[in-house]
Image (cartoon, coloured by chain):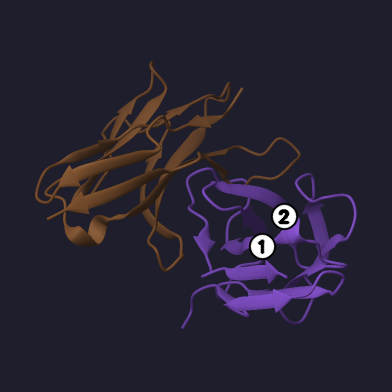
């Protein structure tokens, strides 16, 4: 089973509208972190926001917020007042406590967001 | 620039040649991760290293690929006898904290390898 599922391969949104990018995850760990990264066409990976499994409040960073629903295992990214510069690939990722192996990130396949003027 | 530095940014190799990708982690970070991104895909974990140690290489192809992180100098991902299927973007990330699920990985800008 996939650990991170992003069901929206692509989205078109009008400028200034809010947009929600979906992410569901699968883990049996109690302690884990959820991350969103933005990858513009230039290719770099930009860290946007983090949510810990024990955090009771949804994370917010400027126009980004994370809608964390632990029981449903979802961690959707919400971008308010979208801008043309938000057009990019967005990746949801999870980091679990190490179990003798890598403690890096597991990524979803991404959502390609296009903001239209 | 105190971020993760990768070079070269673009690398073109003919089939059968060797590719060497370099990564200098953020200052103070001693954990390095390599990821590969195929077109239209997310990043796939390849290998996790600490200084002079490979901690987990479960994502590395068994042949032609190797990685090191020497005591001095950058981490190197080496691909011998490249084939067209090796064409991808290779990202390096670093972390200062091991075993911490609440620390983001900081990525370099990637090396885009094209095999002709």
Judging depth in this view, the residue of A106 and A6 nearest the camera is A6
Badge 1: chain ID: B
Judging depth in this view, the residue of B54 and B43 nearest the camera is B43
- Which residue position holds label 1? B32
Residue most extreme to the top: A71
Q: Quadrant of residue B12?
A: bottom right
Marks 2 and 1, the one that precedes in the sequence: 1
Q: Give coordinates of residue B74: x percent, y percent.
A: 71, 78
Q: Give coordinates of residue B80: x percent, y percent.
A: 87, 68
Question: Does residue A79 appear in this view?
Answer: no
Q: Secondary structure at mark 1?
A: strand
Judging depth in this view, the residue of B107 and B100 nearest the camera is B107
Residue at 21% over, 51% down:
A115
* The chain in brown: A
Please say if A12 is above or below B13: above
Which colour represents chain B?
A: purple
Residue B48's tag is: 2
């Amino acid at each position: 089973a996939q650990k991170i599922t992003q069901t929206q391969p692509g989205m078109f949104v009008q400028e200034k509208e809010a947009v929600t990018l979906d992410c569901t995850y699968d883990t049996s760990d109690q302690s884990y972190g959820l991350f969103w990264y933005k990858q513009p066409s230039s290719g770099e990976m930009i860290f946007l926001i983090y949510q810990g499994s024990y955090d009771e409040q949804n994370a917010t960073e400027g126009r980004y917020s994370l809608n964390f629903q632990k029981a449903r295992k979802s961690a959707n990214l919400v971008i308010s007042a979208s801008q043309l510069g938000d057009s990019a690939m967005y990746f949801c990722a999870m980091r679990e406590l190490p179990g003798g192996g890598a403690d890096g990130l597991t990524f979803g396949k991404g959502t390609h967001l296009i903001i239209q003027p | 620039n105190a971020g993760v530095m990768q070079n070269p940014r673009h690398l073109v190799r003919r089939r059968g040649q060797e590719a060497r990708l370099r990564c200098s982690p953020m200052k103070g970070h001693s954990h390095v991760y390599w990821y590969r991104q195929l077109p239209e895909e997310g990043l796939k974990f390849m290998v996790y290293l600490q200084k002079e140690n490979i901690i987990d290489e479960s994502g590395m192809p068994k042949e032609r690929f190797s990685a090191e992180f020497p005591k001095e100098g950058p981490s190197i991902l080496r691909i011998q006898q490249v084939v067209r299927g090796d064409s991808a973007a290779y990202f390096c990330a670093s972390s200062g904290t091991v075993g911490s699920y609440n620390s983001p990985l900081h990525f370099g800008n990637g090396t885009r390898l094209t095999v002709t």
